[in-house]
Amino acid sequence: MGVGGRRRRAGGWLSIVALGMLFVAACSSGSNVVVQAPAGAGPSGADPSQASGEPTPKIGDCRAPLDHTIIDAASDPRPTVDCSQAHGSETFWVGSMSANIEAWPGSDDRAGALLENQVTRECGTRHLQYLGLDIGTMPNLPPDRLQSFAFFVPTERDYQDGARWFRCDAVVEPLAAERTSIDGTLKDVYAKPLPVSYRLCEARLGQPVACDQDHEIEYLASVVLDSLNQFPTQKGDIQVTAACRTPLLTALGLTEERTDLVFGYLLPTQEAWDAGSKGATCVVGAADGSSLRGTLADIGPSAPLPEG
């Protein structure tokens, strides 16, 4: 199928909680976060591989709000917009395809795989730097809507005419059928508290949502579980619960648990665990199961819950 404008985890960090895995919850019914395969069609329904004349992108380019139709296509020939306006992507790197890529990556499997490797090498660390994210100082960072970036290639027609660039864009991950836009800029976004709409929560039936929407649990920390020799139980595993406790208390701004909150965790699939993704996402919800809206981060011992 070749390559599409797929979301990539920057530098491979937090692979234990990468979007697209099936998670099982300690305090909910679990979630299935779907990342669609490349769709191949642009936002208007026309095939972008047949378009032509797109100028070579530049670092700092912004484009309009986006959804899955755009982000899952191989090419995104939409025009740029002023970055002070509503926009959905910010280009932080423009590279040149290596010489061993000898076909359009949008449809050639070998070319697509080669490009994906190149994108990982050239864009992963740069994405971290663009976001202002230092993993060393945030070892328990939970998954959120910024930790993947999109990448795009020229249209097939432009490739045949000699275009060999690829671009990597910082984005707010679209969920379901929504169209996302960026509040200000994503450059150095981690230098201050993350906007609530960028945080990841789960609504009823295990549906991932932004935390400014009604939800039952919030992703507040992540932990590595390399010391576990086998896949933990799906609910109430003592070792996973213990590993999550301190990071969750820290994220909540607490020294001891609140009686109106319940802690839990989400696990990767058994298959992902066996392949080396040994970790968990630590989550928090209201003890009475009530709906929340907003974030629990730094709520402290006495502030009321952000009820939905």
Image (cartoon, helix red, strand yellow):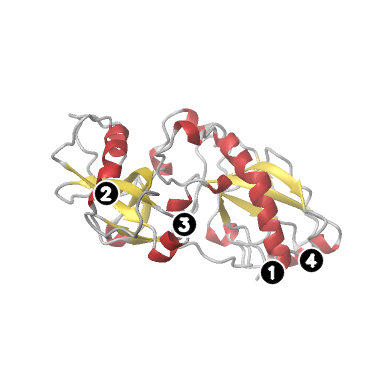
Residue tagged 2:
239
Circle 3: element type: loop
Residue tagged 4:
103
Whole-number angstrom distance, CA of label 1 to CA of label 3: 25 Å
Q: Name the spot of residue 215 as percent of width and height, x first.
A: 29, 50
Q: Nearer the N terminus, badge 2 or badge 3?
A: 2
Amino acid type, label 1: Asp
> Are the residues flagged by discs 1 and 4 in contact, CB closer than 8 Å?
no
Amino acid type, label 3: Gly
Q: Name the spot of residue 108 as percent of width and height, x first.
A: 72, 69
**Circle 1 crowding by C-alpha within 10 Å: few under 14, some 14–19, many from 20:** some
Amino acid type, label 4: Ala
Residue tagged 1:
109
Quarter where residue 89 is shown: top right
Residue tagged 3:
276
Circle 1: element type: helix
Q: Nearer the viewer, mark 1 or mark 3?
A: 3
Whole-number angstrom distance, CA of label 4 to CA of label 2: 49 Å
Whole-number angstrom distance, CA of label 2 to CA of label 3: 18 Å
- Where is 138 relative to 226, above or below? above
> Are the residues flagged by discs 2 and 1 in contact, CB closer than 8 Å?
no
Q: Name the spot of residue 189 as percent of width and height, x first.
A: 51, 33
Residue found 59% across the figure and 35% down from its top: 129
Whole-number angstrom distance, CA of label 4 to CA of label 3: 32 Å
Residue found 55% across the figure and 48% down from its top: 12
Q: Is residue 183 left or right of residue 244?
A: right
